[in-house]
Each structure stands twice: as C-alpha cells, then as structure tokens.
Amino acid sequence: MLQADDPPPVTVLRENSPSPFVLASDHAGRAIPGRLGDLGVGIADLGRHIAWDIGIAGTGLRLSEALEAPLVAQSYSRLVIDCNRRPGHPSSIPQASDGTAIPANRDMPALQRGAREAEIFAPYHACLAGLLERRLMLGLPTVLVALHSFTPQLGRPDRPAPGGTAPRPWHVGLLHNHDPRFALILRDLLRDEGDLVVGDNEPYQLSDEDDYTVPVHGERRGLPQVEIEIRQDLIGDAAGEAAWAARFARLLPLAWARYRQDNP
C-alpha cells in the first residue's frame, strides 16, 4: 500500500539514550497514504482531533529533547488505522468518528485492512517493542510514557455530539490500568502545581480491551507506565507545546525518583 513518496510509518529519536523514559506517540501524525486519497473526508475534518492528537507531535519532540529520552512516533492518521487499538477492534479502522463519516473505511476488503495493519500498525509496534526489549537486555531502568491529547469538547457547532457533551474541565489526565503506581505519583505532583485540574483516568479510562500500547508494551513487560492526556487547546501552538513539555520534563524525573524510593 505504501509507496516511495509516502512517509515511513514510524519515526524514532534518541533510540540509544539511557534515559529511563521511553516516549510513545500513537497519534502524532495525520499522514494518509497516497493510494487512499483523502479517505472521502473533507479538509476541515482532517484537521480535527478525529484525525490525530493535536499538539502532541510538537510536545513529544520538545519533551524528548528536554529529557534526552527515546521517542517512538507514529506518522499516519488514526483514521487510516488507530495504533492504540488492537487489530479487529471496532475503532481500529473507524467508519465514523465524532459525527464524521469515513467513506473509504466502509465495506473494506480484508486485503486492504491487512495492508494497513501490516504496513503501518505492525512496524510502529515492532519498533517500540524492539527498543524496549533491547533496554531490558541491557538492564536499563525503563518507564513507558504514552503521549496523547484530547479535544476540549466533542462535536462541533454544525454537528453536535449525540446527546450533547459538556466542555471537559481537565487540563490534563493521567491514565492507568492494572498498575497505577507511577501514574498516581505523577498525578499528585501535577495536582501539587496548584494551577491545574488533573483527571484520574479522565477523560478516558485505560483498559485491556480499548487500548493497546500501555497494556501490551508496558504492563506485559512489568514496566512502570502512564498514559498522559493533555487538553488540545493548551498545546495548540508552539508556546503551549513548549510550556507543557517543560512541565513534564521537570515532573517526570521527580515522579521516577519517588517511584524508586517507594519500590526499591
């Protein structure tokens, strides 16, 4: 499916860094393979949160630089295939998202679905898995940090969300699943900042069924892990990206120090 002029499915920075943090960005990009055109989606919708995690690409780049940490970032739109969903999940290749139909994803032949999984989903996760396994072999302490952003409100003026959706009050959310220890330390540090509304498993809940990166790459390896969700209007420009990257560059090492103290 991918052609020579399509971007590679994954970008890796600082893969040999000994930093304890490994950053993963499942929805950093919004590229669409040339063979798929625009998926039948208008340009305005391709700029919305349904296509990518707005602001998280720049935030991740800045945070990787500040922490000198490895970053594994996915290049393609979640409308092509969502790299934080297991293959076969109902929203892995969505037919609609937040009121917008995705015509090219309807009645898709199995061969095309398989091509998206093999050429986009699989290389991204193989890259992340390989990086984590090499670190384990070297005995490097590792915290998996999944970077995401969330829309301030579902729906849009001309197409409200079904049933209506209130504005989301959280500035940032910390998501966790079976092992919440690192996430809860980071949550408390964020709350101690005094200027934030911090969600605990808000605006989403992390689960084995509906998530992939943290359960598969973090929890199955017994690694401390957290999924960070930043509200998109707060990282919608370079200044916001820089401010949030700086905040997490300051707080993540503090959380790691407390985690190691509590879990020798």
Image (cartoon, rainbow, N blue to C red):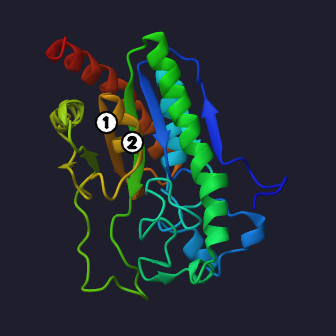
Figure quadrant of residue 103? bottom right
Figure quadrant of residue 110? bottom right
SS type, badge 2? helix
* Residue found at the very far bottom of the displayed protein: 158
Figure quadrant of residue 105? bottom right
> Which sits in the foreground, 192 or 23?
23
Write the residue at 67% across / 53% down.
Answer: 119
Tell me whether the residue at label 1 lies in contact with that at label 2, contact meaning CB atoms closer than 8 angstroms.
yes
* Residue found at the very far front of the displayed protein: 110
Residue 206 in picture, x, y percent from top left: 27, 51
Residue 51 in picture, x, y percent from top left: 53, 65
Write the residue at 55% across / 75% down.
Answer: 45
Write the residue at 41% across / 37% down.
Answer: 217
Q: Relative to 62, is 107 above or below?
A: below
Residue 229's label in the rendered image is none
Write the residue at 39% across / 22% down.
Answer: 142
Q: Quadrant of the N terminus?
A: bottom right
Q: Amino acid at mark 1?
A: Glu
Residue 68 visible, this angle: no
Q: Amino acid at mark 2?
A: Val
* Mark 2 neighbour density, 10 Å: few (under 14) some (14–19) many (20 or more): some
SS type, badge 1? helix
Residue 216's label in the rendered image is 2
Residue 148 visible, this angle: yes
Q: Relative to 59, is 262 above or below?
A: above
Residue 219's label in the rendered image is 1
Residue 91 in picture, x, y percent from top left: 43, 68
